[in-house]
Amino acid sequence: MYKIAVIPGDGIGKEVMEGAIDVLEGTGVEFSFTYENAGDECLKDCGYALPDDTLALAKKSDAVLFGAAGETAADVIVRLRQELDLYANLRPVKSYPGTNAIFQDIDFMIVRENTEGMYIGVESENKDGATAKRLITHKASQKICDYAFKYAITTGRKRVTGVHKANVLKITDGLFKKTFYEVAEKYDTIESNDYYVDATAMYLLTKPQFFDVIVTTNLYGDILSDEGAGIVGGLGLIPSANIGDKGALFEPVHGSAPDIAGQSKANPIAMILSAKMMLEFLGENESAKAIDEAVLKVITQKNILTPDMGGNSTTKDLAKSIKNNL
Amino acid sequence: MYKIAVIPGDGIGKEVMEGAIDVLEGTGVEFSFTYENAGDECLKDCGYALPDDTLALAKKSDAVLFGAAGETAADVIVRLRQELDLYANLRPVKSYPGTNAIFQDIDFMIVRENTEGMYIGVESENKDGATAKRLITHKASQKICDYAFKYAITTGRKRVTGVHKANVLKITDGLFKKTFYEVAEKYDTIESNDYYVDATAMYLLTKPQFFDVIVTTNLYGDILSDEGAGIVGGLGLIPSANIGDKGALFEPVHGSAPDIAGQSKANPIAMILSAKMMLEFLGENESAKAIDEAVLKVITQKNILTPDMGGNSTTKDLAKSIKNNL
Ligand SMILES: CC(C)[C@H](C(=O)O)[C@@H](O)C(=O)O
Ligand SMILES: CC(C)[C@H](C(=O)O)[C@@H](O)C(=O)O
């Protein structure tokens, strides 16, 4: 029996979470789900975007499922990542047949450093302007690069690409690049190379099949994974895992989408695939695989799809259809 | 007679520059070209990537044409931008018919702040890690936003989109965003909106036709313009202008491409279109238009193209063909 903290959050977060829980219940794996609040509504209701109770629950659970937060997203999700030390943010970019993906046969993983970089929240302002501090440590760089190479090995991937901007950020990204190659040396069965982040933004479009595993710092990972979403047809299909040594949190890459919230239009697949990543994390590989296959089947059949994929089914019905195909 | 500083630089920089000068000579506009060195080779030969003579020449010319630099690119081009206070970096993203652009009918302009952000070069390292400082000032933000709206008005564009990450970088990007809307208020005939940089990286692929003028900080502009290059089929076609109050520098967005240097394979169009942007800057609009039309003609005829565009002509021949079509 796994103890799962469920934080649906705002807007479509609630709707897609319902779908994902429904699918998880169909796997036969035993869970005890405990719900807590976070996000804009929560801030309005109780004065905190991330209440202590929610944080405490997240910390003592086996894993956390997170939906989405609105304006307060940074205060909720960035804080959760840091408080739980979820240092590895995994964002698979995969194209599904028959979708409006720009390219077919896309299948790479972005491993994003999740605790430092531009996200440390050290900013200040005076009359001359505002400054922000970017922090890159050897320790965090080593940990994330190591994670990426280990991931490549366990999943049978063959290449890891380190992404940085060391021509301009010579010291911070220089450290990341140096550390990347230090780690690469230990994994001699895996190819390694490095690119500048701007070049990568182009190569993702001019040679997307080149990429296998990308490892990069926090903000570059943020930008490149949304570009990846664009490549495979939008955020409705991109799940993510935030992994630490003592816990993990799973969330769709999309946000709370106020424009379509409450209309049962949201695509639950990103959240369902996030739940699938949770199953993998928990070692429930059979069930994870069953979800993967069910998602692929439903996408390929094209009968029951949400509007973003050209269908007119509801969030609930799409989730139900995936559950029925388990 | 315009005094033009010509800095071909490294690798294909030299080859594409030759092509661009050839085309400029075909326009009938009178130039006096003065050549100077910069880049990796220059560093090897004389000990400086950007010698004082080159900088002095750039400062006293009416405009600078720059090819590309290799490993020393940051020391050359970032320094030139800062020393000449070329605060606006214009990067048009435009799809040409018959190319391998991902979308047709793409035509937007990225206006990138060019003097601050992550490019101020303030970094340090100690035993705990490395830090970099990001600087956003009200002054530079106002100047670049104002440039973007003025640009929209003079070129008949209808919308300016401000791009930032103010949900995470609340103070620095918060300042940029606030300044963007302050400026937007003064231009009530132009629509304005703002997006997060990650969302923009996706929207450039899911709704590229939405974009008209994008204005953003230095590094985001760097990344998004390379993504733009990917959208229109690669860097071979993307020119850029670096504009200041007292001078301007024109360069292709591509680099020195050591892998194809010296093989007469490089596509000179990005450099030729950069020369075209120089003509516009100098007020030689007729000649600029002639180059634009000649480029379009040659691309559409498909007889003489470099390998990156599916042809097998040389850099020189492609340039010559554009010159002959003026
Ligand atoms: C909501 C925001 C703080 C977050 C981030 O920047 O990490 C989001 O864009 C993401 O990618 O998960
Ligand atoms: C070469 C490099 C310093 C430069 C930059 O980062 O600005 C380049 O990528 C560009 O976009 O002109």
Image (tube, coloured by chain):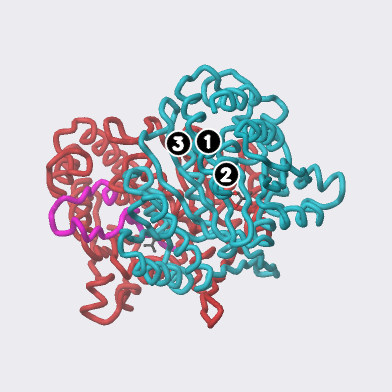
Chain colours: A red, B cyan
Question: What mark, if any, has residue B24 been given in the picture?
Answer: none
State how far apart marks 2 and 3 are (Cα).
Answer: 23 Å
**Chain ID for label 3?**
B
Amino acid of disc 3: Val
**Chain ID for label 1?**
B
**Chain ID for label 2?**
B
Classify A91 as above or below B56. Answer: above
- The disc, 3 or 1, on the residue closer to the chain's N-terminal end is 3
Residue count near mark 1 (Cα–Cα under 10 Å), binned few <14, some 14–19, many ≥20:
many
Residue underneath mark 3: B232
Residue count near mark 3 (Cα–Cα under 10 Å), binned few <14, some 14–19, many ≥20:
many
Q: Is mark 1 within 8 Å of ligand 2?
A: no
Question: What mark, if any, has residue B237 been given in the picture?
Answer: 1
Residue pictured at 27% horizontal, 65% vertical: A7
Residue underneath mark 2: B279
The answer to whether the residues at label 3 and label 1 have Cβ atoms under 8 Å apart is: yes
State how far apart marks 1 and 2 are (Cα).
Answer: 17 Å
- The disc, 1 or 2, on the residue closer to the chain's N-terminal end is 1
Closer to viewer: mark 3 or mark 1: 1
Secondary structure of the residue carrying numbered label 3 = loop
Q: Quadrant of residue B214?
A: bottom left
Residue A75 in sight in this render: yes
Residue A175 in sight in this render: no
Residue pictured at 43% horizontal, 32% vertical: B96
Is residue B262 one of those drawn in magenta?
Answer: no
Q: Magenta residues: mostly which secondary structure?
A: loop
Magenta extent: A246-272
- The disc, 2 or 3, on the residue closer to the chain's N-terminal end is 3
